[in-house]
Image: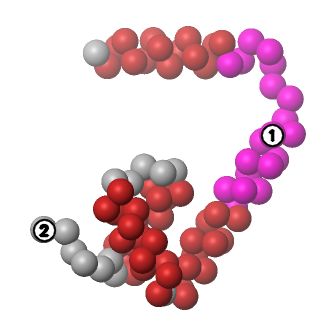
Amino acid sequence: MTPNRLTCEETFRRLNDYLDRALSPEEKRLVEEHLETCAGCAREFRFEMSLLDNLRAKLSRIDIPEDMLARITRRLEEARRECE
């Protein structure tokens, strides 16, 4: 049975998945409801979101070798085949 509300601890454990958009619709709803009513968890969420935003901004300014994406894609495909 799914709880009607999440505790701060339960919400905190789900924050990374929430930020990564990896929660089920029900879990997402529960996290959002908790963040709307808990100032402490909302503050932690804003902090983690700001870290991700800053990291994304810095990463977007890094020049990477042209063939890097192809190498990463190839390795991911190899790893996927090994798991099958």
Q: Amino acid at mark 1?
A: Ser
**Closer to the N terminus: mark 1 or mark 2?**
2
Q: Is residue 66 magenta?
A: yes
Is residue 14 left or right of 56 when viewed as pictured? left
Q: What secondary structure is marked by label 1?
A: loop
Q: Give the class, few, some or many, for how many residues have Cα within 10 Å of label 2's Cα (few <14, many ≥20).
A: few
Residue 56: x %, y % from top left:
73, 48
The stretch of residues the image draws in magenta is 51-69
Mark number displayed over residue 82: none
Q: Amino acid at mark 2?
A: Met
Residue 12: x %, y % from top left:
44, 71
Write the residue at 55% across / 88% down. 39
User: Gap in Å between the C-alphas at discs 1 and 2?
Assistant: 42 Å
Is residue 17 left or right of 44 when viewed as pictured? left
In the rendered view of the protein, which quadrant contains the C terminus?
A: top left
Write the residue at 60% across / 80% down. 43
Residue 55: x %, y % from top left:
74, 51
Vertical placement of 74 versus 41: above or below? above
Instruction: Name the residue beneath numbered marker 1.
Output: 60
Q: Are marks 1 and 2 in contact (CB under 8 Å)?
A: no
Q: Give the class, few, some or many, for how many residues have Cα within 10 Å of label 1's Cα (few <14, many ≥20).
A: few
Q: Nearer the viewer, residue 5 or 75?
A: 5
Mark number displayed over residue 1: 2
In the rendered view of the protein, which quadrant contains the N terminus?
A: bottom left
Q: What secondary structure is marked by label 2?
A: loop
Write the residue at 80% across / 49% down. 57
Indicate the quadrant where residue 60 lies.
Answer: top right
